[in-house]
Image (cartoon, rainbow, N blue to C red):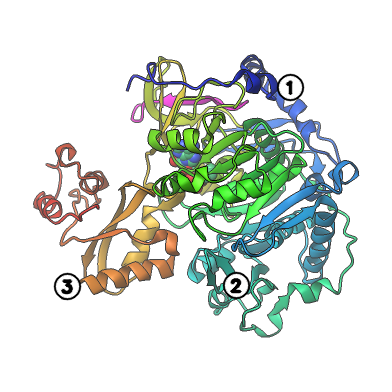
Amino acid sequence: MSDKDAKTYPPSDEMAADAHVNAARYTEMYEASINDPEGFWREQGARVDWMKPFSQVKDVDFTLGNVKINWYADGQLNVAANCIDRHLETRGDQTAIIWEPDSPDDEAQHITYNELHGHVSRMANVLKNLGIGKGDRVVIYMPMIPEAAYAMLACARIGAIHSIVFAGFSPDALGARVNGCDAKLVITSDGAPRGGRVTNLKDNVNQALLNDFDDVKCLVVKRTGQQVAWRGDLDFWLHEELEKVSDDCPPEAVGAEDPLFILYTSGSTGQPKGVVHTTGGYLVYAAMTHEITFDYHDGDIYWCTADVGWVTGHSYIVYGPLANGATTLMFEGVPTYPDASRFWQVCEKHKVNQFYTAPTAIRALMGQGNDFVTKCDLSSLKVLGTVGEPINPEAWNWYNNVVGQGRCPIVDTWWQTETGGHLMTPLPGAHAMKPGAAMKPFFGIQPKVLEPTTAEELIDNPAEGVLVIADSWPGQMRTVWGDHERFEKTYFADYPGYYFTGDGCKRDADGDYWITGRVDDVINVSGHRMGTAEVESALVAHSKVAEAAVVGYPHDIKGQGIYCYVTLMGGEEPTDELRTELRNWVRNEIGPIASPDLIQWAPGLPKTRSGKIMRRILRKIAEDDFGALGDTSTLAEPAVVDDLIENRMNRK
Ligand code: WT7
């Protein structure tokens, strides 16, 4: 593609004049951040309040076998104090959180910073009463209700480490995560309404904790009032516990490098790993990126449609916005309930200024027609954002023209659970956007494009290869919970001296970056990351399955769909009923987001003579790209490929 000729969208004069960062300032700040990282990040460290000021800024080594990442290491602070207490004097009566419930017929809530202070302090005291202290792990498995944010901040207030598990995950997946971080407590709600349907969250917790967890307590928020089964004296209603505590809970001084949270995410091999983010650097980076990427100004109403179960919810619903004293909107529902107008009605109702969502939602809504959008007054919108996967130009143009009415810059933010915050994005007042491009590195970020096999750095433009980052930034993950060796192997072994992102990328003739997608066995389904190995291991756990190989394929709405090649045990019949059974099986093992889209019966899988499954070939078949199968002569049984092609699934 000749990106030089692609249409670009420069910032309006107004935007460039009012923005925190315009083009000249971007260049000046970026250069400073690269030439003098210590000085740059020392200055940015002042974005947060320190209980004990830091003297050290950066202490980083990317050398395999010796990887360490420390920022502001001798400083102490408290995240909840930064997100709440320090704002009380100037904006105690300002709304901190607007909560919009699943049903538009129910009333929205406006929670001020003063009220947030009370809710969080009391919840923190409840946690203490339940025996939770500094360094203890608390799993949060909640709907998108204000109590989810209170729970996160209550943990932060007492120095406990939270690990949020997305409420769409199955009991098995929840149990594995409770076990993985050795949690003492699970915070949940009775039920979770979403799109008019209710999930029995407490039931899921009961199932997850059924065996071997008779020391894990559970704190339950009453959301729906439905009947729930109680695990004897291990379970507690939040509203009852709140009656026993005061709202006086001084924030604990926490080391900058003490963990703030663990968040499990899928990788190319094995089971999900616990990404560890720490306190000081993470907060500085989340706050800075939130302010600059979205060009957030005091008084703006900001809405990120993510769920707190994903990193986007951590950094850009809760920590970044609240650290900046923003008004952040939390939405319990889905974009299509009661109809495809919901997002835009919420924007109109609450006069949203910055709106941040995922390409998969944009594509789904685009398909419903423009009336759902145009009947709403979207004049409050100033900046639009996307995250999670590459956005196709068609969806970008619709977002720009129909939602943004051609006057709102779109920040296409590329980042990862591991990176804590945005690593590449156009800035609203600085860069001429190109539909689908992540454009420019954020301050302090040094992207490099490497030739995948030789690891040679590609200097000239244009370039295409794998994307690595040459040096650390404060929001970077520090380790994998309980397994530092896995951390080093996953991110620092393939391309020595660099952080390996797992993404491929192009840098065009102008030096702008375009993310091309994962280069490993991770697929991106509706912006959610899924390890193909995880789906495979769920499939082979079924008694009728002998072997399985899972790949992604292009899907109109989801970006990628889940395509499974399944070899059955001898004597098993490949029926449609079995297909349904396997699909439900995977949903139960992992959760609905892992539901196989297509299951193809495969009498044999293409393997090398040493028995390694050749996924490259399976991917091509799933993509309907038979011309490009490449060399199949090294296969143990080349004929299996013909069978797979002949019986490939119809992708429609
Ligand atoms: C992977 C990370 C970070 C929050 C959401 C996902 C893909 C993310 C973009 C984007 C192209 C993107 C990458 C990345 N990705 N944002 N703007 N353009 N691709 O977090 O689950 O950790 O997934 O999502 O492939 O590696 P995650």
Judged by its main secondary structure, the magenta piece is loop
* Residue 177, above or below 572: above
The image quadrant where one finds the N terminus is top left
Q: Amino acid at mark 1?
A: Gly
Q: Residue at x 38, y 66 (%)?
A: 586
Q: Amino acid at mark 3?
A: Gly
Q: Earlier in the sequence, mark 1 or mark 2?
A: 1
Q: CA distance from mark 3 to mark 2?
A: 42 Å
* Residue 611, above or below 190: above
Residue behind mark 2? 191
Number of numbered labels in the structure image = 3
* Residue 246, above or below 157: below
Instruction: Give the extent of the magenta segment.
Output: 440-454
CB of mark 1 near ligand 1 (< 8 Å): no
Residue 546 percent coordinates (x, y): 25, 67
Number of other residues with Cα within 10 Å of mark 3, as a class: few under 14, some 14 to 19, many 20 or more = few
Q: Secondary structure at mark 2?
A: loop
Q: Is residue 612 magenta?
A: no
Q: Nearer the viewer, mark 1 or mark 2?
A: 2
Q: Is residue 633 left or right of residue 41?
A: left
Q: Is residue 326 left or right of residue 139?
A: right
Residue behind mark 3? 570
Can residue 227 be seen here? The reply is yes
Residue 631 percent coordinates (x, y): 15, 38
Residue 151 percent coordinates (x, y): 72, 60
CB of mark 3 near ligand 1 (< 8 Å): no
Q: Residue at x 15, y 76 (%)?
A: 571
